Image (tube, rainbow, N blue to C red):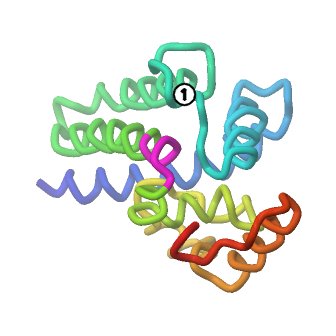
Amino acid sequence: MLGIPLGLLAANATEWAVHKYLLHGQGRHKSSVWAFHWHEHHRNVRKHGHYDEDYATHPFRANGQGKEVVALALGAAAVAPLFPVAPFFVGTVWWSAANYYVKHRRSHLDIEWAKEHLPWHYDHHMGPNQNANWCVTHPFFDHVMGTREPYLGTEREQRDRDRRAARDGGAALSPAAA
């Protein structure tokens, strides 16, 4: 049973490290296999206020969502050989991969849900520093590593919202209306 908390810890640490070092580190280079994250996903999300149309399609397409599904499946397969000796750990890692996909997908289709349930992920995409808030499912490792930077509900977010509204010719939105 020790495999369950160890699996949760390993999954969150992996989520943090893969996001920081592969998806952002290597992903900034257009020739990288990880480039889809920065050059497709982040572009879509910034352009559409956290919404990513790639997630509105089925998951087996050659877009950011499809590539994410392949990466999660490969990660889950990588721990499969440990199943005979650590079934609770492996099962927890597999559950964590599925949980990651479900939460990440929903966060980019239902923005209000994301703001309520994954504000750290909203902060990652919409905040001024997209090189922070690496965790998606839970911010544990962001807290441990000192990379959690709140944005949602801050004065900075309100100023940014007011500036966008003025630029777009509309009235500023109150925090409740946004």
Q: Residues within 10 Å of mark 1 (few under 14, many from 20)?
A: many
Query: At 54% from the left edge and 58% from the top edge, which residue is drawn?
Result: 121
Query: At 61% from the left edge and 77% from the top edge, which residue is drawn?
Result: 174
Residue 107 is a magenta residue: yes
Relative to the observer, which residue lies in front, 21 or 42?
Answer: 42
Measuring from the top left, give residue 149's x and y in whole percent. Answer: 63, 75
Report the magenta residues as a range.
Answer: 106-111
Q: What residue occupies the far bottom of the structure in this picture? A: 155
Compared to residue 108, the image places residue 30 above or below, namely: above
Measuring from the top left, give residue 54's x and y in whole percent. Answer: 58, 28
Q: Quadrant of residue 100?
A: top left
Compared to residue 67, the image places residue 97 above or below, namely: below
Residue placed under numbered mark 1 in the picture: 65
Q: What residue occupies the far left of the structure in this picture? A: 1
Q: What residue occupies the far top of the structure in this picture? A: 61
Compared to residue 144, the image places residue 51 above or below, namely: above
Relative to the observer, which residue lies in front, 71 or 127?
Answer: 127
Number of numbered markers: 1
Inspect the image, locate mark 1, and give the three-letter code of the amino acid beneath it: Gln
Measuring from the top left, give residue 59's x and y in whole percent. Answer: 46, 20
Residue 7 is a magenta residue: no
Relative to 159, is 178 on the left or the right?
left
Q: Quadrant of residue 106?
A: top left
